[in-house]
Every structure is written in structure tokens, then in C-alpha cells.
Amino acid sequence: FLTELGKEGLGEEYTWGTGIVKFIQMSLGGAGIGVAFGLALVFLLYVLNRKLIAEENVLQVASTITIAYLCFYVAESVLHTSGVLAVVLCGVTTKALGSSLINDVELMTSFWELVEHLLNTLLFAIGGTVWGTIISNVHPREFNATDWGYLFVLYVLLVIIRFALVFSFYPLISRIGLKSSINEAIFMSYGGLRGAVGIALAVSLDDVVFRATGDTGSEYCMMVTKLFGMVGGIAFLTLFINGSTAGALLKKLGLTKKSEVYEKLSATHYDTLKEKLLDGFV
């Protein structure tokens, strides 16, 4: 996108060869860094795995967020690979090898739920503020009636594309795992809310272009403004339309009723819990 803007100093030109090399560097490089940091975090959790010392519980929690941000920084800024992939693989590695090493699972879970909520709130507050200046046509940003028309067309197309993607894999997901039904596939298609990731990328892109041009009224910033308007608009429409009507659709499709699989899982869970309680008393 930055290259297509045509602004000198923005973006890089890629051929097929350099594009493949860059893809391998970003994907495999980021994955490798993530696994390395994940193993380092598992080692830290192992060292701090002393349940009788309360301070160790806090240090374990602090180490997880420290390693996560350090992993992203090293992958993205130092080694120029994918920071997002690195953090994902770091988390997967830690989950696979270090789950049993966590002293206080409740503390760890509560901490990360709080962090997720606060960062999501901050992201949507920043994104909403910027999007608000765009749709209110505060000079020099402008989002006119034509752009609103394109936004609604884009929204409809994205919904259609999501339905097409989900149902193209329906023959597979209907036969594996819990075997999704046709009604579940419909809801998965309709309930796809687009928000945090798109807004984060749009905010980042807006900042990069502004820093490179130094003028919010330039043609480059105006192009990014249109893009931001579309991303924010899609997030708003999916949350406002899809989100507000999802409950009614769930009831209409009969997905609020307890299925046979749910009943079996509940019964199994109840029996297991009862056995553990009896073993504890004995």
C-alpha cells in the first residue's frame, strides 16, 4: 500500500524473488523467534515454579507480559520479521510446554483478561476518536456521501465473502471435531465482527504516512483517510448491525437450545468433578 501511494521514501518495491524471500523471512523468521522466546519463558516459569512463595506467583505473571513485548520488539524492530507471528508462536509454545508450571492459574488468567480489556478499550478509544474526526469532515479530513455509499457496498461484499469462505469449508468442518451444522455455519458467517486488528493497522498506517509527509492535507494523507474511514466504518457496521442482531439470529436458528453433544459434555464434566471431590474427601 505504501509503495502504491507513490511517495518517495514510503514502501519498498518487490519482485517475485524478493517477495518470496521477504515472505519466508517474515513468516519462518517470526515463528522461529517466537518459539525461542517461548522456550525462554517456559524456563523462567520453571525457575519460578515455587507455589509456597507468593512473590513467585507475581513474578511469573510479570514475566509473561515482559517476554511478550520483548518478543514483539526483537522480531519487529531488531530482526525485521513478523512481530505478530512471533508473539503468537511464543504463546503457543508456552501453552504447550509451560501450562503445568504456572503457580496460580487464576491470577494469571485474571491478569491477562484485565490487560485484554484495557488494551481493547484503549485501541477502540483511539480509533474511534480518529474515525470520528474523519466522518465529521473536520478539515482537512473528508469523508463525503460517495464514500458512505462505497462503505455500505463494501460491507455487503465482505458479508458475502465471509459466507462464501465459511461454506467453501463446510464439507470439512461438518465432518471433523464437533461437526458443525448448517445453522452453525450460517451464524459463523454472519457473526464475523471486524474490529481490533483492522483498526490497529489503520491507526499505524495513518501515523506512518503522516510522519513521512508531515501534512494531514496532502494527497497521501487523504488516501489514508479514506482507508481509515472504510476500516472504521466496517467495524462500526458489523458491531452495530451484526452484533445487535446476533442474539435474535441465534434463537431463530435454534442454536440456544442445548444440543446432545452439550448434554454429554456436561454429564461427563459433572461425573469427573464428583469423582475428584470424593477423592479429595477420602
Image: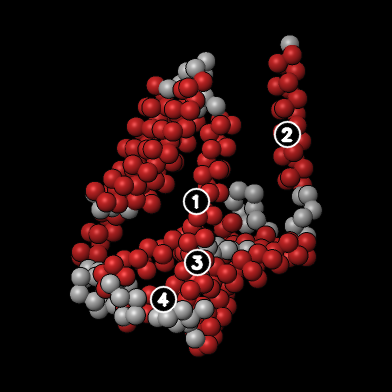
Q: Residue at x 28, y 59 (%)?
A: 23
- Earlier residue among tags 1 and 3: 1
* Mark 3: secondary structure: helix
Where is mark 4, residue-wise? 225
Specify the amino acid type for callout 3. Thr
Q: Which is nearer the N-term, disc 2 or disc 4?
A: 4
Residue at x 48% of width, y 64% of height: 127
Identity, as a three-letter code, of the amino acid under mark 2: Thr
- Residue 48 at x, y percent in the picture: 43, 22
State yes or no: discs 2 and 4 in contact (Cβ < 8 Å): no
Query: Please, which residue is most extreme toward the bottom here?
Result: 146
Element at badge 4?
helix
Estimate the x, y position of residue 162 in percent, counting from the top left: 55, 69
**Which residue matches tag 2?**
268
Return the residue at label 1.
119
**Along the line of sight, which residue is nearer the eye, 101 or 282?**
101
Element type at mark 2: helix
Q: Is residue 149 visible?
A: yes
Image quadrant where residue 183 sits: bottom right
**Number of the label disc, if any, that sits on residue 129:** 3
Q: Do the residues labelled 1 and 4 touch (CB within 8 Å)?
A: no
